[in-house]
Structures are given as C-alpha cells and as structure tokens.
Amino acid sequence: MSQTQLPALRIGLAGLGTVGLGVVKIVQRHGDLLAARAGRKVEIVAVSARDPKKARGVDLSSYAWESDPVALAKRGDIDVFVEVMGGHEGPARLATEAAIAAGHDVVTANKALLAHHGHALALSAEAAGRVIRFEAAVAGGIPVIKALTEGLAANQIRRVIGVMNGTCNYILTRMEATGQGYNVLFDECAKLGYLEADPNLDVGGIDAGHKLSLLSAIAFGTQVSFDAVELEGIQNVSLDDIGLARDMGYRIKLLGVAQMTGRGLEQRMTPCLVPADSPLGQLQGGTNMVVLEGDSVGQIVLRGAGAGEGPTASAVMADVMDLARGTRLATFGQPAASLAQPIAAKTATPAAWYLRMTLLDKPGALAKIATCLGEAGVSIDQMRQYGHPGANAPVLIVTHKATREDIDHALGHFAGTGVLVGAPVALRIEEV
Ligand code: NAP
Ligand code: HSE
C-alpha cells in the first residue's frame, strides 16, 4: 500500500480546555498540511470533556461526544487516545490505562500522571505493543523530548539543566524588573490565568520537578523517580536576594538540574543563582529553557514557550504526527523493562554558595561567622557588608565550592555566635 492510501489516523481527544482546544484548532486549520506531511489524513473522531454545554468557540459538531473519558478511550473507532485533562489520578489515569488495554497509542501532555505512574504505564503499553508519547508534558512547545530521545540518542548525557516552569520565571523576573514583592506578582499571575488549579504545583516547584523527573528517565536510562527530586519552591525568594544577587552578577532562577554522578542520580529543582550573562540568566518572563549536555555533542540550548494553547498543542500534534508517520519509540527512549532502578545521590555535587545574613554590627561579629564557616570546612570567596542606618548590618558571603552538608553544618553554628539577627539565606550558585 502506498503512503497516500493509508487510512486516516483517528484521534479520540479527552479534554477540551486550553490544550485540547489548541489541538482541535490545529487539526481543523492544518488538515491539508498534516495529511501532506504524514501521507495520510489526521482526524478527530470523538471528544470528551466535563461540560457538554460549554461554549468553546470551535465547531465540534462533527465529532462524537463521550461524557466519560474512559468510554472514549475504549472506542473501537480511534487509533490514538490524546489525554489533555490533567491530574495524576482519576479520569486521566483510568482513561490512559483503558486506552492501552483497548490497544490504542496514547499522547499526553500530563507530566503529573507520568511523573507518578510513567514507569508502570510504559511497561503496560510496551507489553501491549502500544506507544505513549509526551512531548507536551515537558517545556510546552519546546521539542526537548524529541531532542533527547532522538537527536542525542548516541550521546551519554552528562547533565540536564533548565528553567521548566514559566510561572515561576515570570514571577522572579518581574520581581527584579518592577521591584514588586512575591505576593503582588503571585496575585498578578492569578489574574493572568498563569497558575495551575493548585498554585503550589507551580510556586512549590512540583510541576517543574515532574518535568525534570521525566527528562532524567530518558537522559540516564532510569525509571522515573519523582519522589527522589529535591524540591524547593520560590515562595521565600525575597526582593533583597534578587537585588543582592544582581549586584554580584547573578540572577535567581527556579532551576532544575539532573546528573548521574558516582554517588548516584542527582535531581534538584530549587532556587539557584546563575550568572546574569548566561543564557539561563538572561531568560525573561514565562519562557522556558532546557540545556542538554552530551559527551559528543557538547551543550545544546533549547528555548521557547513552555505553556499556552498554541505551543502546547503544537507539541501534542508533533507526537500525533509521529504516530501517523509510523514512528514508534519507547516511552522513555529504551524498552521500559531495561530502565534501571535509580540510586538517588545522598549528597549533591559541591557548589559555590550565596549566603545572606544580618549581623549585629559589633567588633568580632564577622570573625565569628568566618570561624563557623572555616570550622565546617567552607572557604570564603567574596564577602560584602552593606551600608546600614541602624545596629544591624546586612552581610553577603559567596563561598568557594562546598557541600550542602558543610554549609548546613556552618549555618547550624551561626545561631550560637550571638551575632546573627533572623535566619540566614543560603542559595546554591550553579555553574551553567
Ligand atoms: P484545562 O484548561 O483545565 O482543561 C482540562 C480539560 O479537561 C477541560 O476541557 C475539562 O472539561 C476536561 N476534564 C477535566 N476532568 C474531566 C473529566 N473527569 N472528564 C472529562 N473531561 C474532563 O487544562 P489544560 O491547561 O488544557 O491542561 C491539560 C493538560 O495539559 C494538563 O495535564 C496540564 O498539566 C498539561 N499542560 C498544560 C499546559 C498549558 O499551557 N495549559 C502546558 C503543558 C502541559 P471542561 O472543559 O468541561 O471543564
Ligand atoms: N504551569 C506551567 C508553567 C505550565 O507555568 O510553566 C504548564 O506546564
């Protein structure tokens, strides 16, 4: 059979929100282009959402309606089940499992589902000869899954690093640009509709942690291990830290880092300082950036929209087009049964640290702090004391490379010096 005689690829679409409607619009707008590129038509057969009466601004009249996404997933007249409802349990999980059991391929934008159940779903899909693709789940419109799985397939990946939550990057860059505090900008994000239904997924670093865990699995050939990601959100990043970091030539980012070390797999999603003039340091607003480092290719920088109707639907449809063309890759780039059980690194790679504190301005105060650091084996690289009207002096220290444990050990002794006012802030400075 020649390519043009192939039957249409038939989609069952579960979810008609931001992403689902974007998928509908691409299929309706670009029908000829998709058919020309895939060598066959790509069409939506049936859809599902909660509210059948909701006005959605697109013509859905030619699609069958299923009020139950599990029923949609089981339909005999679809080839691929596209899941864009969200949530790591409930309908998304049940319908995805049902689609695989019914013999359908799955395309999903749901990072939470895969971060929690990706390995089990990949095993069952592969046992059934089915494929799960999830380009849209990580960094929206950026083709990072494709880059890792295909473009860099012959590389040993050294490190994956990036900004993977646009909302957090928007808040942090707007704090610097406007001088407005975290709470004001959180409210602005709520008004703009940027926040997930549970905003803690964004600002708590969880959403970005989900994404990092999926990239780790592909990069290092390991089972998804979201529970092992060290997570810290941006809620406590202050305007003071943003300003002082800038004075030292840095910007604060919610940064994901995954690397395989001799101590095991390191996965972190935490606020970090990066050089202001680096590509990551220059990243503004809601944009995402993922940096991939391979032994042969060196460093690759991918930048683009991490969310939104068009970019996310573009990524969903890239996966659909792969299936239409007959490209069938294992979920995490190699057979799921061959993915290793990762050993989580108990200690992180040493780094330079930014330490901000307020000290009583009296003789010997700095010496006491320096002694705590020295006794913990932490060496000072730079130190600044800022002008101040009262008796309390803002002090900033940048250390040479040290482990988190040594930093914590030193901080633990700061309180006993009697010169510390309030709690110190410690942020890792990442080499990028
Ligand atoms: P959304 O706008 O909230 O849309 C969710 C859709 O799912 C709605 O159409 C909703 O129906 C439907 N739905 C929810 N529960 C359902 C159920 N029990 N049965 C049937 N339909 C149900 O969400 P979204 O922003 O499009 O996100 C969808 C997925 O893509 C999520 O996994 C998200 O994390 C991921 N994602 C989103 C973006 C983005 O920019 N938005 C980017 C990357 C990844 P009703 O419309 O009737 O309420
Ligand atoms: N809430 C996510 C973000 C969008 O702000 O990046 C989808 O992943």
Image (cartoon, helix red, strand yellow):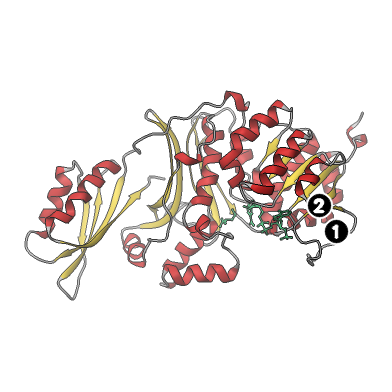
Instruction: Categorize mark 2 by other alpha carbons within 10 Å: few (<14), some (14-19), many (20+).
Output: many
Report if residue 431 is visible in the image. Answer: yes
Q: Is residue 402 visible?
A: no
Q: How many marks?
A: 2
Disc 2 is placed on an element classified as strand
* Residue extending furthest toward the top: 338
- Which residue lies at the image location 73% right of the left edge and 28% below the top edge? 128
Residue 47 location (% of width, % of height)? 81, 52
What label does residue 47 carry, if any?
A: 2
Q: Which residue is mark 1?
A: 60
Q: Residues within 10 Å of mark 1 (few under 14, many from 20)?
A: some
The quadrant in which the N terminus is found is: top right
**Disc 1 element:** loop
* Contact check, label 2 and label 1, Cβ < 8 Å: yes
Give the quarter the ligand 1 occupies. Answer: bottom right
Where is residue 404, by image quadrant?
top left
The kind of residue tagged 2 is Val
Horizontal side of 55 relative to 332 (left or right) equals right
Q: Position of residue 345 (x, y in %)?
A: 39, 34
| Residue 426 versus residue 123 in the image, above or below | below
Is 258 placed above or below 338 here? below
Asked if residue 386 is positioned above or below residue 226 in the image, the reply reads below
| Depth order, front residue of 169/44 | 44
Residue 186 placement, left or right of 422: right
On-image quarter of the C terminus:
top left
Residue type for callout 1:
Leu
Q: Is residue 188 left or right of residue 38?
A: left
Q: Residue at x 59, y 60 (%)?
A: 197
